[in-house]
């Protein structure tokens, strides 16, 4: 039976989890502590104007979009996936695969396109992936991907843009 006390306790627990999760975001995945000078930089106010709220949350605050919500999850045309923050080409469609996780996944980035850093948030030991040009958070890489690399670059679709290859004329 659902009581007011039960609802109060559940609500309090949910707020506590939300508060802890916001505190648990490590500095290692925040884009404001660059491992190198970034070619593309903006103030926080400029990023907020350039990006949608969802893009800002992921790219600049190391957030995560909900699984199975990105239209890029079902993008199967030949082309290139680029950073939504600075347009740097990041992944070729040739490396995209269906991981079943709900996020666009790739087995390799384009050469020099991404940076990787330790992410120990939420009690997990993961590797965060960010854009090499602007430092925007893209997602994480895991070692359970397909051959030839055995890696799964699990990316937030909202952090990416897709450009299809131009049609070849005869």
Image (spheres, rainbow, N blue to C red):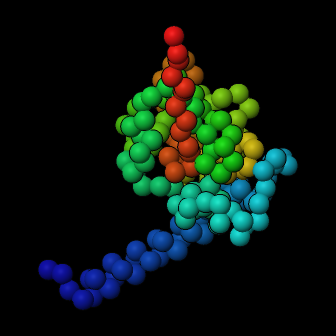
Q: Nearer the viewer, residue 103 or 149?
A: 103
Q: Quadrant of the N terminus?
A: bottom left
Q: Is residue 95 visible?
A: no
Count of picture labels: 0
Question: Relative to residue 141, is residue 14 depicted above or below?
Answer: below
- The answer to whether 5 appears left or right of 26 in the picture is left
**Percent of width and height locating residue 99:** 41, 34
Q: Nearer the viewer, residue 84 or 97?
A: 84
Q: Residue at x 74, y 32 (%)?
A: 112
Q: Residue at x 57, y 22 (%)?
A: 149
Q: Is residue 82 visible?
A: yes
Question: Relative to residue 151, is residue 12 depicted above or below?
Answer: below
Q: Residue furthest front?
A: 170
Quadrant in which residue 24 is drawn: bottom right
**Percent of width and height locating residue 30:** 69, 58
Q: Residue at x 55, y 65 (%)?
A: 53
Quadrant in which residue 166 is drawn: top right
- The answer to whether 80 appears left or right of 15 in the picture is right
Q: Nearer the viewer, residue 87 or 167?
A: 167
**Percent of width and height locating residue 26:** 66, 60
Quadrant in which residue 107 is drawn: top right
- The answer to whether 2 appears left or right of 109 in the picture is left
Q: Residue at x 20, y 86 (%)?
A: 3
Q: Residue furthest left?
A: 1
Q: Residue furthest right?
A: 37
């Amino acid at each position: 039976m659902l009581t007011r006390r039960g609802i109060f306790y559940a609500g309090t627990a949910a707020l506590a989890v939300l508060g802890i999760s916001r505190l648990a975001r490590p500095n290692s995945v925040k884009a404001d502590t660059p491992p190198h000078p970034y070619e593309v930089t903006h103030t926080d106010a400029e990023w907020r104007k350039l990006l949608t709220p969802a893009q800002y949350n992921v790219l600049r605050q190391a957030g995560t979009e909900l699984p199975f919500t990105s239209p890029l999850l079902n993008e199967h045309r030949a082309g290139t996936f680029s950073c939504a923050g600075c347009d740097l080409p990041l992944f070729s469609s040739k490396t995209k695969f269906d991981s079943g996780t709900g996020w666009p996944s790739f087995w390799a980035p384009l050469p020099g396109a991404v940076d990787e850093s330790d992410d120990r948030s939420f009690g997990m030991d993961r590797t965060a992936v960010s854009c090499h040009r602007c430092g925007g958070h893209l997602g994480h890489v895991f070692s359970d991907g397909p051959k030839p690399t055995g890696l799964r670059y699990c990316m937030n679709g909202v952090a990416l843009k897709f450009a299809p290859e131009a049609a070849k004329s005869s």
